[in-house]
Image (cartoon, rainbow, N blue to C red):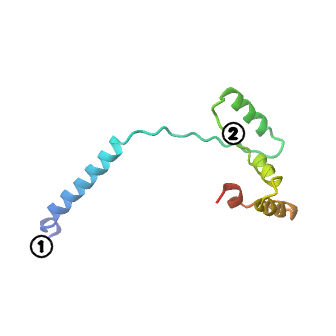
Amino acid sequence: MSRSNHPLVPLLATAAAAGLALYLYKTLSAPKKPKKKVVFVLGPPGAGKGTQCSLLVERYPSLPFFSAGDLLRAERSSGSDLAAVINGKISAGGVVPPPLKNGP
């Protein structure tokens, strides 16, 4: 018996079509969520990243702005357990590992 003559072929084709139809229905009928735009401003120290971001926030007030350096400095001065870890890394001349910067 060839594969195309197998008795399960019509059943599987129907199931596949039903699955595809359900997928398309869910995809096309789902409310569209607006895509969030993320802008990363990268550069060496003193390149003007903070200045450019300040200008962007001035022009687009609804644009949230986070400075990794400002956040780390604020945490270092908080006296928390995490501040001790950050201070230890920086004092040893190391880099703060991404899990600490990105959160748990």
In-front residue for pair 82/20: 82
| Residue 89 position in % (x across, y down) | 82, 63
| Residue 60 position in % (x across, y down) | 65, 29
| Residue 96 position in % (x across, y down) | 76, 59
Please give the name of the residue rendered at 15% of the width and 67% of the height, measured from the top-left corner.
8
> Which amino acid type is marked by label 1?
Met
Looking at the rendered structure, the secondary structure element under dot 1 is loop
Image-quadrant location for residue 9: bottom left
* Numbered circles on residues, count: 2
Is the residue 69 above or below the residue 13 in the image? Answer: above
In-front residue for pair 1/91: 91
Identify residue for label 1.
1
> Which amino acid type is marked by label 2?
Phe
Looking at the image, residue 99 sits to the left or right of residue 2; the answer is right
Looking at the image, residue 101 sits to the left or right of residue 94; the answer is left
Q: Earlier in the sequence, mark 2 or mark 1?
A: 1
In-front residue for pair 41/82: 82
Q: Residue furthest bottom?
A: 1
Identify residue for label 2.
65
